[in-house]
Image: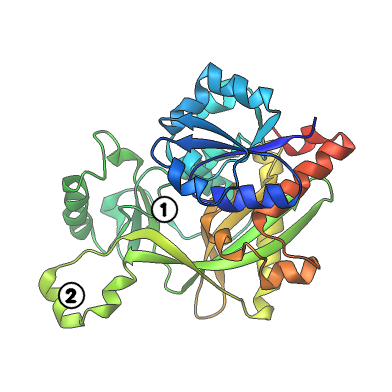
Amino acid sequence: MRPAVATISSHSALQIMKGAKTEGLETVLLCLKGREGLYERFGLADKVITISAVEDLMKKEVQRRLIGENAVLVPHGTLISGGGLEEFEREFEPRVFGNRFIFRWEYDRVLKDRLLLEAGVNVPKRIASPGEIKGPVIVKLPGAEGGRGYFIADSPQDYAKKMKAVRGRGLLRDGEEEDVFIQEYIIGVSLYPHYFFSPLTGKVELLGCDRRYETSVDGIGRISAKDQLEIGLTPTFRVIGNSPLVLRESLLMDIFRDGEGFVEASKRLVKPGAIGPYCLEMICDESGKLYTFEFSGRIVAGTNLFVNGSPYSDLIYDEPMSMGRRIAREIRKAAESGEMDRITT
């Protein structure tokens, strides 16, 4: 019985299902109530399992259905944002494409910083407490929610004022302030390379790159400096979309160096290491130096730009190759060669 590809109805589900069907695999959509109509429009789901919340993945009846369909769960950002990842590691019985143990490292910013340092990449300095702020920093709330509630501060007083506003907007729950992550703010251009590591070939592939469009930090440029000062707006970094980016070719050596360093570090710290898609979230400063400020250990939404492939995937494959299709191809090939244990956990 060939494996089916299962995923949750959000983030990059359409791309994942499209890629699976292109590779001749069945699809199972874990569809959140109220979203059925959207996904019916595209006709990419062969089977639908209705759930009320992401946490329903842990229900025994949902897991039994996935196992009965011989489904491999392809995780994305919606799974990571909810937390509860230790329970998922221990008690989710169906196969998961990739390394289910790396998601907790993505969610926990201290573990995330440790893995990036182990990878040998340039990492912006971490600020231990608000009292140590002596220049521009970016303040990140707990979890993986696409930059929601992030803000920039330049002094302890500025931090306190803006943190009060964040709490007032309900973006920070009681007891979470101790988990806020404060990091040096690097001035430069953001870039998000999309990597794929195949345990079957031992190679790291670059399949695309994007930039994120973030409100209100990107939208504030439409307001004059005078008006910005008068309204007292505090820009935030919630992602609402992505745009494609082609890098200058001289940067690619560093892009691959850092991507391969991440794979090797993950093998040491989070066995069995990175599997399949991941993203290093970077800033390139005016000297061309790359800083990696976060990572995602699974498919990122920026890959949705490249359903028909990217300039980089075109250099590797003589056919359209999205990240969703690349995942499905890895699953199909592993199933055909009896190596599913090498690509799933």
Give coordinates of residue 34: x percent, y percent: 38, 39
Residue at position x 66%, y 65% in the image: 308
Residue 326's place in the image compared with 273, above or below, is below
Say which mark, if any, is on residue 146. 1
State if disc 1 and disc 2 touch (CB < 8 Å). no
Q: Would residue 222 be found to the left or right of residue 326 on screen?
A: left
Q: Position of residue 271 (x, y in %)?
A: 69, 35
Q: What's the residue type where badge 2 is placed?
A: Gln
Q: Residue at x 79, y 65 (%)?
A: 317
Q: Residue at x 77, y 49 (%)?
A: 329
- Closer to the camera in the image, 54 or 113: 54
Q: Relative to the observer, which residue lies in front, 233 or 120?
A: 233
- Which secondary structure, mark 1? loop
> Would you say 37 lies left or right of 67 here?
left
Q: Where on the picture, by quarter, is residue 261?
A: bottom right
Q: Which mark is residue 228?
A: 2
Q: Exactly how many numbered labels are in the figure?
A: 2
Q: Earlier in the sequence, mark 2 or mark 1?
A: 1
Q: Split into 4 quadrants, where in the image is the C terminus?
A: top right
* Mark 1 residue crowding within 10 angstroms, few (<14) / some (14–19) / many (20+): some
